Image (spheres, helix red, strand yellow):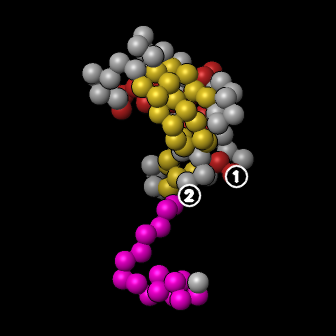
Amino acid sequence: MSFLFSHCVTATFRLFQVKYDGERMQLHMDEGGAFKFYSRNGFDFSDDFGRSAGDLDKFSYHAARCLAPHVKSVILDGEICAYNFQVTIFIRSRNGIKMEKFA
């Protein structure tokens, strides 16, 4: 094991996965354009993250703008992270910050 680790440390190519520490969420958009957001435990967070593309102060507004016009329904599973464009960093949720406040 120590050989493998020392080889990885001295190799010219390294691959790392950055942990952004956001909110794990599953986004559902149905054919009518309605959004729903579920936690990994199945709790509904749609009120926090938005129910439509018209919710201008919610994440659903931004998500809808990222989808191609031909997309009629979609399910996305991932992590929602807040990004501060002024200082170009991701804001970490483990500091007690709620991601839904940054739409």
- Residue 73's x, y, as percent? 40, 20
Residue 84 lies, with reference to residue 77, above or below; the image says below
- Residue 28's x, y, as percent? 50, 24
The type of residue carrying mark 1 is Asn
Q: Which residues are magenta?
A: 2-18
Residue 81 lies, with reference to residue 67, above or below; the image says below
- Tags 2 and 1 touching, CB below 8 Å: no
Name the residue at 28% across, 22% down. 69
- Residue 32's x, y, as percent? 42, 10
Asked if the stretch drawn in magenta spans residue 11, the answer is: yes
Packing grade of label 2 (10 A; few <14, some 14-19, many >=20) is: few
The N terminus, quarter of image: bottom right
The type of residue carrying mark 2 is Lys
Write down the quadrant of residue 61 in the picture: top left
Name the residue at 64% across, 36% down. 40
Secondary structure at numbered mark 2: loop
- Comparing 11 with 60, the one in front is 11
Q: Is residue 102 left or right of residue 43?
A: left
Q: Which disc number belongs to residue 19?
A: 2
- Check disc 1 and report the residue beneath it: 95
Secondary structure at numbered mark 1: helix
